[in-house]
Image (cartoon, grey):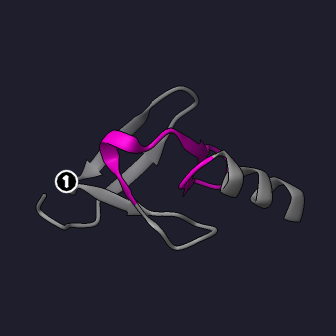
Amino acid sequence: MNKKLAKIEYLPNNFKILETGDHVICAVSGKIIKLEELNYWNVDLQEPYYSYVEASQKRENN
């Protein structure tokens, strides 16, 4: 683990790494998400979420 924040472009069914790193930060909880565990994001907002819980919270608050 190189402990570097990655810069990601979130696409409809995938994501593209713009700047190499090993993690991103959840937009709701602030938790670290390893790229290999990244499964939830919002394409329109370009935000990652730690789990379905945070993704649901974001949806409910908008």
Work out which residue is located at the far left of the displayed protein and give it: 2
Give the amino acid at mark 1: Thr
Q: Position of residue 17 (x, y in %)?
A: 30, 44
Residue drawn where x is 77% and y is 51% of the image:
56
Q: Quadrant of the C terminus?
A: bottom right
Q: Residue at x 67, y 57 (%)?
A: 54
Direction top: furthest residue: 13
Q: Is residue 28 above or below residue 7?
A: below
Q: Nearer the viewer, residue 60 or 12?
A: 60
Classify mark 1: helix, strand or loop.
Answer: loop
Q: Specify the segment rendered in magenta.
A: 33-51
Q: Is residue 5 above or below residue 12?
A: below
Q: Residue at x 39, y 42 (%)?
A: 37
Residue drawn 21% across and 57% down?
21
Q: Is residue 10 left or right of residue 35?
A: right
- Circle 1 residue: 20
Residue 62 seen in the figure: no
Was residue 14 drawn as part of the magenta stretch in this picture? no
